[in-house]
Amino acid sequence: LKKKTVSKTFSESLNSLMEKLRATEHHYIRCLKPNQTLKPGDWDNEFMFKQLAYSGTLEVTQIRKAGLNVRRPLKHFYQYYKVCADDPAALRAGTVTKRAELLLKQLSVDESKYRVGKTLLFLQNYEIIDQLDKVRELRIMEYVINLQSFFRMLRDYRRYRIIYRAVLRMQGFCKSWEIRRAYNEVRGTAKLFQRYARTYLAHQKMLDWKDVDDPELTPAKKREILLKILHPKKHGAARIGLSGRRRPMRLQPARVMGDDADDVEYAEMPKFAVSHEGWLHTKIGKWNRSEKLYISLKQGTLTIFEDHESLTPVLSYNLAVCSLKSEDSKLVLTRTEKLYKHKVRSVREIGRRIKGPLWGTDCVVLEAEGAPDVLPKWAERLEESIAEAKLVDAYKMQVNLDGQDEDGPVNQKVAQVIKEGYMRKKKPGNSKIQDLKRTWERRYFVLYNDGKLKYYDSRAKRDEKGSLDLRFFSLQEIDEDVEVDEEEEGEEKQALKVQNQFFRIMKGKQFALNSGKHVFFLASPEREVCDEWIQTLQTTLAILYQKSPIFSQEFLRVCMMDGTFMTMPMTETTKCRDVIRHLCKKHALNNETEWGLLEIWDHPGLPGGLSERKLPNEELLLDQTTLAWEQAARKRYGLVSLVPMNAFKLVLRKVTSLLPQARTKKEQHLEFCQALADLREGRFTVPDKTEIYELAALAIFKDLHEGMSDEEQEEELLLEEGQLTAQLHHYLPNHWFKALEMKRGALQKQQLSDWDALIVHSFNELTRSELVESESMSQVRRIVQAFRMETELNSVAATRMFIERVRLAPLCFSAQFVAEMWSVDKILKVLLVINYGGLHIYRLGPNPLLLSTFDFNTLVSWQSMNDMLIINIIYTTKFEVTKRREKLRFLTRESIHMKTLLSKYAEAVLADLIKRMKQRELQNQQEEEED
């Protein structure tokens, strides 16, 4: 064995010492001498400070004091001290770093005394740990006390549960007894109903036997069948086998006290019950060729459409003036009277009688090839509907012009006169040449309560010249612009001098009765007479529409922005506010006041040439909205059984953009659907098309991430050019594609490829790259940058960003009002739009034209006085530097509501402005600290 050298021994001892040090938590110790005399109790301060200074201990202490020398593992710190949080639910975050930061903010720890790293928490001193330990001890003590109280309460709680279960058993016994009693009552009533139903079925079976002559049905056989129907348990069940034929509708007459025996009156108005529809081979005129067309039978009206989707009417018949005849596997429906009956010369009448059934429109031949069971069913339905239509057409309505309701029955034997008097009439021709030939004719008009407007030569009513069935017409007043010569000096305007006598020229008035392509003009030189007729006819038409309404009078259909719809019952007292409240409750929408009902027409028929209108909250849906639809449908389509589904519809939209915080998932989904619809329908207007591509990219990001799992969402998603070409029409405005249809195929492909490339580029920039703030940034990029600083980019964040940008556009998420703007020169009807961006003024029309916009930096004050909204503004013109102050006056009945909206939006804008200022100040402070 070799002897250990000195170096080997030293090495082994050093290794042993290092192993012992590694196994312990060692500290640095510096030994200092209190004096140089080597005596106990002698402390020399100056000598001690010199040793600390020369050894560098003071500098190390200062450095450690200035730094964050206390370090703790981040995960262990959060798990150990999270019990100290006041609101544990607010600590939810994606990473431990963010959760630790939220915990320290809740504990009110000074931000300058700690820093949160990726894996460690750096603290300035141990005082913070001591404070957190005290708080943790108090919280744990609270939990211990709660546990102790629970165990103390457990014995009493068990006793309470025993008593509670005993009470429930007693209640269950009582409820069971009550339910059993109610069940026996319902069971007895059901047995009574069944007995009456079996009696009714037996009676119907006897009626069917009267129409059938079968020698096998002996009286004994009939008796056996009837006993089986009436008592199936005793005599055995039998197959009833009714024919199913509907009996013709009859009205039960009711006599009224004080009337003559011959004056028969009916208490109730008959209603249509027969409806049918389907495809048939149809010939309009016996000599014309056959075509396969869609036929609808409803409300006593037979309408032939080109197809069942567009519902474009070809021909319609009022079955009250039609006759049906079956001929060799076909049905011949002949019209005896037209919608507008006018007496003409005998020669022309003979020509019409010959032309109408053969190659005209007075006859329709229905055929069904390869389906023998179809025509008998149509024949049965048509016969029943003709009988119903004749009863309804002959029914006399109660018309009260003085506004007093009379509940008494109406004499159905003789039609009563509602109004009569002289008017001038004119029926336009089928061409301009015929219009020039036809002139105004003076006739004596008589309005009856059965809905007929007849006119005669004179007051004697001997020779009837024509008649109209008013329930298929709508009334429209005509505003005439009369050119009057300029006023000469010294003469009065609109004055006439005849034989040294002066007369004043008064303008008459005219109105029209419209039914599709049919128009009937009425006029009078006296405006008062014409106004009386208009008022009478409007009241009468509103009552006559109840005979054959086009729209349902009992149910209301409301469309949602996500493409679904909801049907709800409707009464005479149903208001718009009630429907909004019901829909918000049904779909769990928290912000009821921010939603509104919009009626949307497929043509600009609303006042001001608009196609959509927000319904006031107090509007009656049956007596106002539905009545306006009935009038507009008769004016546009005339005599029809159905109108297209999208011709008139109610849509639930968000009409304000205040965007409160408490929004449900369903509400946010509806807001996104509305924002996307506004983008596609062209309501979202922006001078830079880049924002449209960026919004389309956000919508695509949202749709792609909705069906992904959490792991798939964490992966980066990269799009390539050409992937979105087939889906572009879902995310870009529709009018872009309509304009693209006029171009060639190669140009269309190139344009679609360019749009796809721009959207893909925007998608990759917004979702992957870091956005650098600059003055030329678009509004979408600013919103995305602000959101990405606060939260991670996911489908929910993309939805919120999409809504946030679209709501700033003038016509999106906005409240719209029709008003009259008063100025010194004239009165102009305008469309006022109020949203987050301020007040926007549009000229009325099918495509509203923006006149001016005033944001909340320009609006100074606003107030409402009666029906007038007065707004003070400060503005500058384009070529002037000085500011001007003006007053805008708008006449509208919703001035109070508009004032409230302006105040709420102003508060929201001010709150956002203060929030941005605070964020900028905080950002500037952080930049100064970093510098």
Image: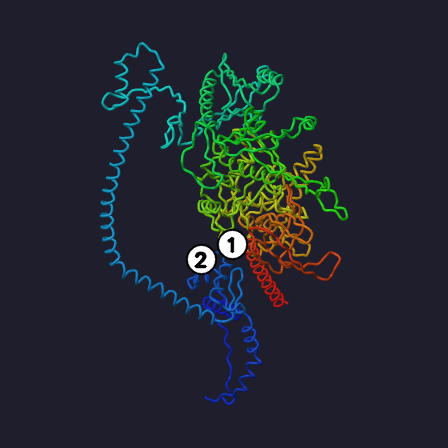
How many neighbours does mark 2 have within 10 angstroms: few (below 14), some (14-19), or many (20 or more)?
A: few
- Expressed as whole percent of the image width and height from the top left, the position of residue 775 reads 68, 56
Seen at 32% across and 61% down, the residue is 147
Judging depth in this view, the residue of 848 and 536 nearest the camera is 536
In this rendering, position of residue 845 left or right of residue 274: right
Q: Residue under circle 2?
A: 89
Q: Residue under circle 1?
A: 660
- Expressed as whole percent of the image width and height from the top left, the position of residue 918 reads 58, 64
Distance between the Cα atoms at labels 2 and 1?
21 Å
Query: Furthest residue to the top?
Result: 215
Q: Is residue 548 above or below residue 782?
A: above
Does residue 3 appear anywhere in the picture?
no
- Expressed as whole percent of the image width and height from the top left, the position of residue 527 reads 61, 40
In this rendering, position of residue 452 left or right of residue 238: right
Query: Furthest residue to the right?
Result: 489
In this rendering, position of residue 16 left or right of residue 438: left
Badge count: 2
Seen at 28% across and 18% down, the residue is 225
Q: Is residue 891 above or below residue 569?
A: below
- Expressed as whole percent of the image width and height from the top left, the position of residue 698 reads 59, 46
Judging depth in this view, the residue of 923 and 837 nearest the camera is 837
Label number found at residue 426: none
Quarter where residue 281 is shown: top right
How many neighbours does mark 1 have within 10 angstroms: few (below 14), some (14-19), or many (20 or more)?
A: few
Does residue 132 appear anywhere in the picture?
yes
Q: Is residue 441 above or below residue 887?
A: above
Q: Secondary structure at mark 1?
A: loop
Amino acid type for the residue under numbered disc 1 = Pro
Amino acid type for the residue under numbered disc 2 = Ala
Judging depth in this view, the residue of 43 and 254 nearest the camera is 254
Tell me which numbered mark, 2 or 1, is placed earlier along the sequence: 2
